[in-house]
Image (tube, rainbow, N blue to C red):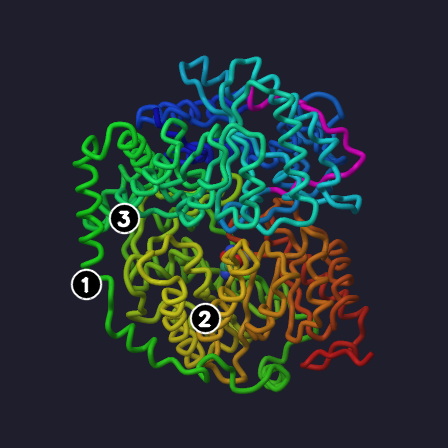
Amino acid sequence: MTIAANLGYPRIGPRRELKTALEAFWAGRITEAELHAAAAGIRAGARARQQGLGISHVPSGDFALYDHVLETACALAAIPEGYGWSGEGPASLATLFALARGARGSEAERAAGIPRGAVALEMTKWFDTNYHYLVPRLSARMRFRLLENRWAAAFREGAGQGARTRPVLLGPVSFLLLSKREDGGHPLELLPALLPAYAEALRALAEDGVAWVQMDEPCLVTDLPAGAADAYARAYRALAEAAPGLGVMLATYFGGLGDALALACALPVAGLHLDLARAPEQLGPVLDALPRDRWLSLGLVDGRNVWRADLRRALALLRQAAGAGFARRLMVAPSCSLLHVPHSLAPEDGLDPTLRRRLAFADEKLREVALLARAADEGEEAIAAALAESDAVLAEARADARLHDPAVAARLAAVTPEMERRRSPYPARAERQAARLRLPPLPVTSIGSFPQTAEVRALRARLARGELDEAGYEAEIRRLTAEAVRWQEEIGVDMLVHGEFERNDMVKYFAERLAGFAFTRHGWVQSYGSRCVAPPIIWADVSRPAPMTVRWSSYAQSLTQRPMKGMLTGPVTMLQWSFARTDIPRETICRQIALAIRDEVQELEAAGIPAIQIDEPAFREGLPLRRAERPDYLRWAVACFRLAAAGVRDETQIHTHMCYSEFNDIIEHIAAMDADVISIETARSDMELLRAFQDFDYPNAIGPGVWDIHSPRVPSAEEMAALLRRAAGRLPAGRLWANPDCGLKTRGWEEVRPAMANLVAAARRLRAELGPESVADGRGRPEA
Ligand code: GLN
Ligand code: ZN
């Protein structure tokens, strides 16, 4: 019998129940027991829905309170010192959340012995998704062992409620490759020490009567570092010996196996899962290489997008595998965990009905999985109606004239290379900008947003409910903007921002003002911890019917003599943080958005806005996982940014912002974007990221984030001054800016007010230390 399987289900809950519970717990409104009860309720609901949809391998252990990588590390005793863990027994919730969010001096932290200054682990993108995981910090001193078998607990929880689930573990090699060593050395060196902990977990699962476990090894689809192939062979040999009766489904996803295909096919596991949405071409070679005693799990339904599957095409792949001798050892599954798509289309009654028919969220995708498994066993006729519907909807989509706007095509065709180039090179621009802006050395700015307080959200809710009219809403937002401008002047910020009070979300705000986008009501996807986003859906050609931000920026600028920075979201990020259509290349979609943003940039300039920030926080996550595919992406992504930015005069300063990026391998391309100023994340990695900018000799100005805003801790002036001092030791002080790591919308004013004031104080201290001559030059090259 073909098995309908799932690799992972959204964790946040159909109504974001996990977010609600976490935030209530952090605020002290619910107890630990209540948090666990809420989480158990979400898991029970998830199991019931998956079973109801016809999935027989329902995953367990895929849930996490904050992040599955962090929970894996904690379960395996990979817990760094300084977070209150005694060295024995499971990590407390206080330790878990201190690792995730940094300490903020709460009662629970004091009780758990967590020092006030404990900073959160580094957070980074999970492969090329918008999910963020916490990077485990490992060292050879750690004694890895199973502190708590979270997978057995998850299995038992399901079994107790009548669901025999398939526990999901992050495999040992990917776990190590996703970690960092705090004592130098390569994480893979720790494999021998780590394996016994995994072996113990698997043995216990086998004893519990678990038939299958899923071992996620997504690193198998990336370019493997030296030693990884041996590590895989060694790890899976050891695990097979540890729990011989246990069926290990080795799950690979986010791409094709490429060079690792022979390796993966030879590992002593019971089954192999393939991502056939991203890499359908790997099926043939795998069918040639995979021993016939293995199970083959076909990831036929795209777990990374919201479009309905082409059932007929999926069936063809399924038949190909069945015909090659795997007919009795087949599983059908989504390509990857469904963590990356919203729960269900069911509550989405606001969508255009023709568009809605083309969509499939997690639950609808699982229905497709079950249909395909059924067709594999009972033949096409068994799902004839579903197949006919799939064909009809796809045909309708292909014929939909609304997808194509001839005016957009004409504009794209008319783009010239000059449109992607600023008039003068950076040094000349910097001089003109310095003369116009007259900023002090180490100018203080922020990344754009200020706290989206309950007050701001209530205004938007009242507007949506019709209790407040457009004019009343605007008046209130203007008041908040004016207050923010006044406050920034008072504390001495040098380049101001308007605060983005009018925006709900940096992508959605623009998407709502552009043609070609559609929106869900409940389409939430976890970004990190309790943070979710509801990505818009790009379903047609993108264009800008009218200015989007000019009124707000002009208003804010009218309130102050100091320079106001306009604030836009860049084309790459707009694309990356949306669910995009698949009928045209991503490059084309991105260029369409770039032209729309370009118009906005030029209009801001015309309105007298002297600096414009084009945020590209998603620039790096768009990078293909395989090195060989990167140059092409970087070519068009850089070109799209430049197309958006380069329509302005030299005097207009273009900023960009990126967060949580590792820059080392793409620094030249970041430089090629040619923004006058870039603000980046660095606080959490202790300025480590600056090394890229130093080694490469980054030519333009940089604002290294000196305040980790993803943590609720308020950094002191000394702390930020120390970071700025380190930055000034590595980079020309004349091209340095002082700013937080990211926007401040998730923080409260009680944090933002003191922290920004501390930042101003830190910048002033550094200015005094460095003296005027090291920094006064607008181009910022220190004579040395
Ligand atoms: N300008 C945005 C803000 O401040 C940038 C957010 C981001 O980088 N994610 O909110
Ligand atoms: Zn950011």
Residue identifier under label 2: 640
Residue identifier under label 1: 401
Q: Position of residue 511 (x, y in %)?
A: 35, 59
Magenta residue span:
134-152
Is residue 292 at least partly visible in the picture? yes
Task: Name the image quarter holding the C terminus.
Answer: bottom right
Judged from the image, the secondary structure of the residue bearing numbered disc 3 is loop
- At label 1, counting other C-alpha atoms closer than 10 Å, the crowd grade (few under 14, some 14-19, many 20 or more) is few
Judged from the image, the secondary structure of the residue bearing numbered disc 1 is helix
| Magenta stretch contains residue 662 | no
Q: Residue at x 47, y 24 (%)?
A: 166
Residue type at mark 1 is Ala
Q: Position of residue 651 (x, y in %)?
A: 54, 84
Q: CB under 8 Å between callouts 3 and 2?
A: no
Mark 1: is the Cβ under 8 angstroms from ligand 1?
A: no
In the figure, residue 234 lies in which quadrant?
A: top right
Q: Which mark is residue 467?
A: 3
Q: Nearer the viewer, residue 544 or 749?
A: 544
Q: Earlier in the sequence, mark 3 or mark 2?
A: 3
Q: Nearer the viewer, residue 658 or 433?
A: 658
Q: Residue at x 66, y 56 (%)?
A: 682
| Magenta stretch contains residue 149 | yes
Whether 124 is drawn above or below 765: the answer is above
Q: Position of residue 591 (x, y in %)?
A: 39, 70
Residue type at mark 2 is Cys
Q: Is residue 441 left or right of residue 311?
A: right
Rounded to the nearest whole Å, what is the CA distance between mark 2 and mark 1? Answer: 26 Å
Q: Is residue 735 left or right of residue 672?
A: right
Residue type at mark 3 is Glu
- At label 3, counting other C-alpha atoms closer than 10 Å, the crowd grade (few under 14, some 14-19, many 20 or more) is few
Q: Earlier in the sequence, mark 2 or mark 1?
A: 1
Q: Which mark is residue 51?
A: none
